[in-house]
């Protein structure tokens, strides 16, 4: 039970001021005897030793001499001053550990300047996987037009084909998270990409065999894409330090946005020159090339990578869990925590508005703004580009704020509040705008501010439960997908009985609900790092040993 001793250990980003006292969530540690992520429930009391003040490296080094002199004055170092000497030794022990850690991390950063960090190679591979993900997802929205003409599909059949993707996508959200957390993110993400790529390439054959075969193929494609986000979240929770978390996630998710742009841009060209099957053959084959690189270069964690430098590995593991895959998922504990439900509810509210805009935007441009179909398609690309840029800009802002000492909780709440209130504001302006150009600008701004959510709720899974990041993403994204399904259907019902203003009002209300829930119940605090807890245990063991020596000397005197 040494891990329950009243030792003050701060969980902070190296080089930043100590984090303010705030509500801790759950222990992400994976070491023996020091906690086990969400299942560990190792709560550490934030009480410092009397007379001990654990501060940042700067303050500790500047005040060490004064404290040393105080201890000498209080008790001396002779046989009659063992208490003062003991206290001074404890102070030096605790303070020197933090200083050594910071110095080591600083040296690691200096050594890394001469080579490309391996963690960012992993991030780029995840980015390219999500680029392919949305390329393969949106190509059907273009190819369905010539396919419908060839096979004589009516609108109801087209809707069935489009929705069949979500059958498999919903099925594997939570399952993919469990698999990634227990087996490892490399295996799961690699499986997902090769699975959906094969399903994409087989789509023309399935369509020619008949509608049932096509529906099954599209559902299989959803199975592969459904595991991608939980697996990616698991990998980055082990590879990316907290000080780089926002910008790395923003880059990966911007791959989805750019994938939509790429798919929408190249699909018409391929169809026009080579026929609609060429879209599926060419896009599906890209996944095979990606998989060959992923299989040879990627690892689930830096601890498994033999090619990573010792300095970078130490830097990463000092700020991440980086441990072995978990063996059991503590569902009762996970679902009992308010921050988890804040993620689920907020993800639902966020995706309701996002999926409505992205699904119904061409219709809005055509019916309300009177754009033709070609113009609607071109303007649909603009929000995706805006989201790609603003997501990376928001990630840079978030990481900068964290590195300058602002608590992770505060940063997550600020970024997600922008992600909620920004779209809500711009949607309320649409009813007062008559100019098509201003309406398109409002749409772009709405989606641009929406992308700040990548540094808010999408980064929060790794904050509150790094060892179970895949499961947490699976839970919240399931709610997000359901919001897209229900929201898309509800929009059609509202338009049949009301107007576009009513559609936007529902989205605005949900954005406000999400803002309230997020700011009341979310947290960005991960619990103490395994290494610092272990150092605390070792410190207490040395203290006990010193007490024994002191008692022995007293008896001898």
Image: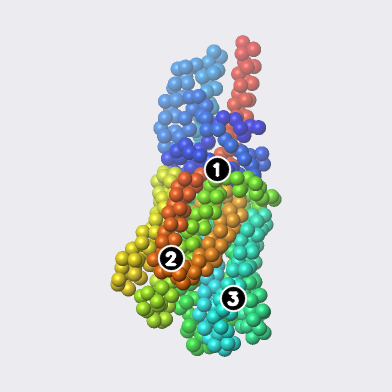
User: Residue 25 — which label?
Assistant: 1
* Residue 349 on image: x %, y %: 49, 57
Q: Which residue is mark 2?
A: 503
Q: Which residue is mark 3?
A: 160
* In the rendered image, the vertical position of residue 35 relative to residue 363, given as above or below: above
From this viewpoint, is residue 89 visible?
yes
- Label 1 element class: loop
- Label 2 element class: helix
Q: Residues within 10 Å of mark 1 (few under 14, many from 20)?
A: many
* Residue 509 on image: x %, y %: 43, 57
First-in-chain label (3 vs 1)? 1
* Closer to us: 114 or 510: 510
- Cα distance in 3D space between marks 2 and 3: 23 Å
- Cα distance in 3D space between marks 2 and 1: 37 Å
* In the rendered image, the vertical position of residue 332 relative to residue 143, given as above or below: above
Circle nearer the viewer, 2 or 3: 2
Circle nearer the viewer, 2 or 1: 2
At horizontal 52% and vertical 23% (from top left) the residue drawn is 87
* Closer to us: 505 or 32: 505
| Residue furthest out toward the front | 497
Q: Residues within 10 Å of mark 3 (few under 14, many from 20)?
A: few
From this viewpoint, is residue 396 visible?
no
* Closer to us: 162 or 282: 162
* In the rendered image, the vertical position of residue 538 relative to residue 161, given as above or below: above
- Label 3 element class: helix
Q: Quadrant of residue 554?
A: top right
- The image quadrant where one finds the N terminus is top right
């Amino acid at each position: 039970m040494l891990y329950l001793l009243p030792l003050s250990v701060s969980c902070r980003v190296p080089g930043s001021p100590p984090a303010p006292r705030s509500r801790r969530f759950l222990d992400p540690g994976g070491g023996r005897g020091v906690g086990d992520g969400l299942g560990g429930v190792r709560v550490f009391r934030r009480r410092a030793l009397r007379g001990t003040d654990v501060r940042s490296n700067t303050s500790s080094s500047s005040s060490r001499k004064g404290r040393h002199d105080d201890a000498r004055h209080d008790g001396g170092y002779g046989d009659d001053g063992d208490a003062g000497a003991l206290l001074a030794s404890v102070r030096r022990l605790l303070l020197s550990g933090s200083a050594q850690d910071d110095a080591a991390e600083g040296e690691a950063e200096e050594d890394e300047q001469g080579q490309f960090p391996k963690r960012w190679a992993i991030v780029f591979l995840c980015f390219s996987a999500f680029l392919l993900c949305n390329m393969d997802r949106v190509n059907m929205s273009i190819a369905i037009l010539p396919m419908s003409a060839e096979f004589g599909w009516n609108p109801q059949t087209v809707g069935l084909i489009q929705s069949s993707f979500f059958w498999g996508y919903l099925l594997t959200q939570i399952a993919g998270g469990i698999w990634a957390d227990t087996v490892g993110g490399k295996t799961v993400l690699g499986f997902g990409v090769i699975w959906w790529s094969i399903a994409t390439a087989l789509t023309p054959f399935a369509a020619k065999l008949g509608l049932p075969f096509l529906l099954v193929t599209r559902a299989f494609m959803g199975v592969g894409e459904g595991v991608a986000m939980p697996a990616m979240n698991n990998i980055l929770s082990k590879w990316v330090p907290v000080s780089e978390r926002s910008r790395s996630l923003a880059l990966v998710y911007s791959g989805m946005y750019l994938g939509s742009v790429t798919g929408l841009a190249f699909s018409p060209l391929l169809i026009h020159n080579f026929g609609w099957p060429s879209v599926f053959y060419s896009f599906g084959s890209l996944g095979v090339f990606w998989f060959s690189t992923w299989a040879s270069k990627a690892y689930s964690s830096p601890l498994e990578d033999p090619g990573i430098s010792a300095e970078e590995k130490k830097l990463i593991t000092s700020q991440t869990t980086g441990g072995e895959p978990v063996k059991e998922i503590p569902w009762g504990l996970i679902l009992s925590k308010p921050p988890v439900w804040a993620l689920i509810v907020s993800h639902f509210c966020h995706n309701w508005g996002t999926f409505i805009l992205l699904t119904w935007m061409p219709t809005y441009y055509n019916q309300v703004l009177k754009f033709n179909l070609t113009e609607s398609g071109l303007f649909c690309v603009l929000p995706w580009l805006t989201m790609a840029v603003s997501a990376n800009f928001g990630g840079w802002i978030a990481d900068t704020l964290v590195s300058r000492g602002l608590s992770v909780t505060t940063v997550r709440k600020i970024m997600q509040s922008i992600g909620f209130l920004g779209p809500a504001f711009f949607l309320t302006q649409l009813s007062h705008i008559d100019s098509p150009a201003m309406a398109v600008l409002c749409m772009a701004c709405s989606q641009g501010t929406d992308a700040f959510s990548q540094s808010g709720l999408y980064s929060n899974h790794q904050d509150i439960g790094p060892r179970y990041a895949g499961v947490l993403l699976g839970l919240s994204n399931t709610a997000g997908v359901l919001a897209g399904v229900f929201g898309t259907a509800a929009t059609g019902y509202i338009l049949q009985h009301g107007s576009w203003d009513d559609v936007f009002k529902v989205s605005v209300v949900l954005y406000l609900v999400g803002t309230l829930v997020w700011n009341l119940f979310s947290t960005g605090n991960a619990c103490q790092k395994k290494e610092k807890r272990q150092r605390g245990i070792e410190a207490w063991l040395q203290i006990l040993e010193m007490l024994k020596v002191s008692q022995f000397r007293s008896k001898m005197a």
